[in-house]
Amino acid sequence: MLSYREALIYLDSLINYESRGNFPYHKKFLDLERTRYILKLVGNPHQHLKIVHIAGTKGKGSTAAMVSSILKEDGFKVGLFTSPHLVDPRERIKIGNQLIEKKELAFFVSEIRSKLEISSLPSPPTFFEIYTVVALLYFFYKKVDFAVLEVGLGGRLDATNVVNSLVTVITQISLDHTRELGKNIVSIAREKAGIIKEKSKVVISPQPREVLKVIEEVCKEKKATMYQVGKEISFERTKVSPRGQMIQVRIAGENHRHLFLPLLGEHQAINAATAIGAIDLLREYGIFIGREVVAAGLRKVKWPARIQVLSTSPFLIVDCAHNQASAEALAKCLKEAFPKKGIIFIIGILKNKDVEGIGRSLCGERNRIILTGINSARALEPVSIKRRISKFGWGGIIIKQKVPDAIYYARSIATSEDLICVTGSVYLAGEVLKFHQAREEIYA
């Protein structure tokens, strides 16, 4: 059997499209038959799981975390598969709030690799395909009551799309991964809607009109039943503070009042309404979850690096916004939750992202900007980012190549009336969390 370190080395040796700035998004390279073949080698564990399957551009991870937390609160054993990870690769596979143990990850990777060594797989598996199979196999062995799966990229060709789900969820769709999924939002919507199965139950977040049309067409074709936030499901935000927000959600004549959500932003309220919609659809399978359980599950949800306050005086906030829509939501949220604070943004962006869109969203309102590097082959050099976003800034833009240097500099210029927000990339958010954890260990 492989050791944990050997398992990680094996996984890192596989084709990893997450770490590539540009790759061929085509059935020739992302072949669901390959994932099905591997799953068959290990006994088709996915066929024995009750699954909630979640795609989207924004909020799919947050929504997955909320669905998982609510189900867990009702006493169910819940597997959660998300990507990418922030600090520890084991974050991708959890049961409840517990990461898969190192020895367990090593065991299941070993099992899969040994099967592959004596099989006739026509082309090598990818990093994400093996991780997906590990998650499904692990959840089966652990006898989870539910598995909540977040799509990695797109939907139609994603390795998770081998499953049949009880409930399908599509969160808000916007422009991202345009090289792979399509240059316009309609093309992207078609890829995301590819997870909708025959006669399935589908809940969707609010969408642009052209996206909604695509999803409606797919649901009609598949004879799937669709429920929308903004139509069958409504929500209202009643209070906002730096700690979180109070919301209420109405669905199927039932009013979920006084819900506290420890995640900031209107987009998270939308995600919460979508998650509650998914939970409500489980009634179709005889699974009834009460309002008190829903409230407790939302109150306890944990989803790091989503407008997460790491420290105060000054406030240090980390967020994963990496496209224009997410950056706009972040800027709006900070203005709402911290109306009297000046903002110092520390920004790092990957090469294949909408640099101008992110810059336009974050550089206004007299915000101060510090650009930093990211420890990734896909990272865009700060000097290149500066050249592309300077036109949006009101003053000088500072470059600090290393993340710790950027944070120290931001703290040196911040007053008690300021907050510091690090954003622009999931990979940058992971570096900030590592840095923050290391500091806490030193001063503990």
Image (spheres, helix red, strand yellow):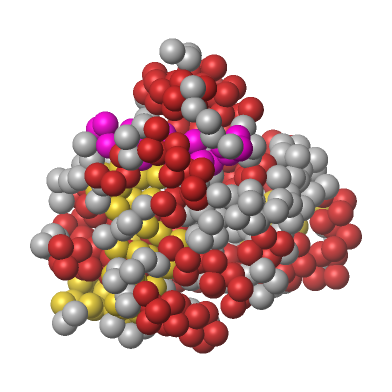
Q: Horizontal and vertical percent for residue 337? A: 48, 66
Q: Is residue 134 visible?
A: yes
**Relative to the observer, which residue lies in front, 198 or 301?**
198
Residue bounds of the magenta highlight: 123-142
Q: Is residue 263 magenta?
A: no
Q: Residue at x 63, y 45 (%)?
A: 18
**Is 24 drawn above or below residue 226 in the view shown?**
above
Q: Horizontal and vertical percent for residue 46? A: 32, 44
**Is 234 drawn above or below residue 68 in the view shown?**
below
**Relative to the observer, which residue lies in front, 327 or 99?**
99
Q: Horizontal and vertical percent for residue 142? A: 25, 32
Q: Main secondary structure of the magenta part?
A: helix
**Relative to the observer, which residue lies in front, 323 or 389?**
323
Q: Is residue 152 visible?
A: no
The quarter of the rendered structure image containing the N terminus is top left
Q: Is residue 126 magenta?
A: yes
**Is 142 drawn above or below residue 350 in the view shown?**
above
Q: Residue at x 16, y 68 (%)?
A: 284
**Relative to the observer, which residue lies in front, 307 or 335?**
307
Q: Residue at x 36, y 32 (%)?
A: 42
Q: How many marks?
A: 0
Q: Residue at x 31, y 39 (%)?
A: 45
Q: Horizontal and vertical percent for residue 289? A: 14, 61
Q: Is residue 186 left or right of residue 42?
A: right
